[in-house]
Image (cartoon, rainbow, N blue to C red):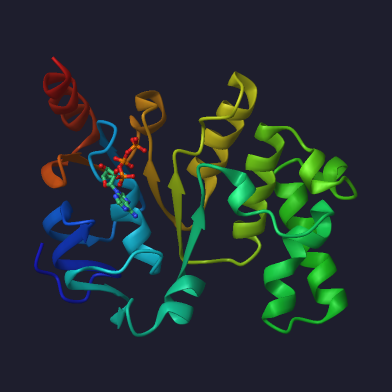
Amino acid sequence: MSDANARIRLSEVTVERDGKTVLKDIDLSLDEHRIAVIGLNGSGKSTLVRLLNALVLPTRGTVTVDGYPTDKHAKKVRRKVGFVFQNPENQIVMPVVSEDIAFGLKNLGLGRAETAVAVEKALAELELSHLADRESYALSGGEKQMVALASVLVMEPETIVFDEPSTMLDLRNKRRLQQRIDALTQRAIVVTHDLDLITGYDRAIVLHEGALVFDGDPPSAISFYEDLCR
Ligand SMILES: Nc1ncnc2c1ncn2[C@@H]1O[C@H](COP(=O)(O)OP(=O)(O)OP(=O)(O)O)[C@@H](O)[C@H]1O
């Protein structure tokens, strides 16, 4: 808990919104390869993971990624921590799928040829090559979700946060996503209500009413969470 060298570190973090405490006194070091965040609706899960790439800043306390405080180094932190949103509409910025995936790389100043190779690779890895020339906004929800993942993977962040990634997916795409997450070399931090997804993870965190109430192995976390739901 007190490892100052941990890649991602939250120290005494409290988040307040509209006079309400959304997260209180969270102290966490996140270093494992696969970490799940579970809890009831409104328990603070999205807020917690949004802290990790400066989408939310702490009201009190500090969040650091590789030692960089998120409030002072948002740009650097976002290169290190990619974010796959629950609603992929939030993530799609260009009208054609391949352009959408290329967007972040172009912003980094990568050349055209290099960008094209990286985009092709990202699409192929997710078995999405057939969507390359499709209109982004006309894709189905599940296809958008997978394209959103490709647009994050292409940036090669060290950590990828998934906020309820399987909500829009059919069983086939859910399994495909699960396999992709399992195969990632990067660290994945996954917020989910889909407890099947997390059984093989290294660690699971349970939030309740803004507090961290359990932190341990997924089977124990799931049974703790199930007790909370009784
Ligand atoms: N910007 C905001 N302004 C006001 N209240 C907020 C804001 N962001 C979050 N909250 C409140 O904080 C609490 C936690 O929200 P959060 O989205 O983190 O929960 P969650 O555990 O991800 O929920 P769910 O499982 O329903 O997605 C909720 O009561 C929510 O209404």
- Quadrant location of the N terminus in the rendered image: bottom left
Q: Nearer the viewer, residue 155 or 62?
A: 62
Count of marks, rendered view: 0
**Residue 136 vertical position relative to residue 31 in the rendered view, above or below:** above
**In the current view of this chain or complex, which residue is farthest to the top?**
230
Residue at coordinates 29% horizontally, 32% vertically from top-left?
41
Residue 11 at least partly seen: yes
- Quadrant location of the C terminus in the rendered image: top left
Looking at the rendering, which quadrant does residue 28 occupy? bottom left
Residue 51 picture location, percent across and down: 32, 62
Residue 52 picture location, percent across and down: 35, 63
Looking at the rendering, which quadrant does residue 127 occupy? top right
Residue 160 picture location, percent across and down: 47, 56
Q: Quadrant of ligand 1?
A: top left
Residue 35 at least partly seen: no
Q: Nearer the viewer, residue 20 or 187?
A: 20
Residue at coordinates 87% horizontally, 75% vertically from top-left?
113
Residue 139 picture location, percent across and down: 78, 37
| Residue 76 placement, left or right of 110 | left
| Residue 6 placement, left or right of 115 | left
**In the current view of this chain or complex, which residue is farthest to the front?**
18
| Residue 92 placement, left or right of 211 | right
Residue at coordinates 63% horizontally, 28% vertically from top-left?
173
| Residue 216 placement, left or right of 108 | left
**Residue 214 vertical position relative to residue 52 in the rendered view, above or below:** above
Residue at coordinates 38% horizontally, 35% vertically from top-left?
192
**Residue 69 vertical position relative to residue 22 in the rendered view, above or below:** below
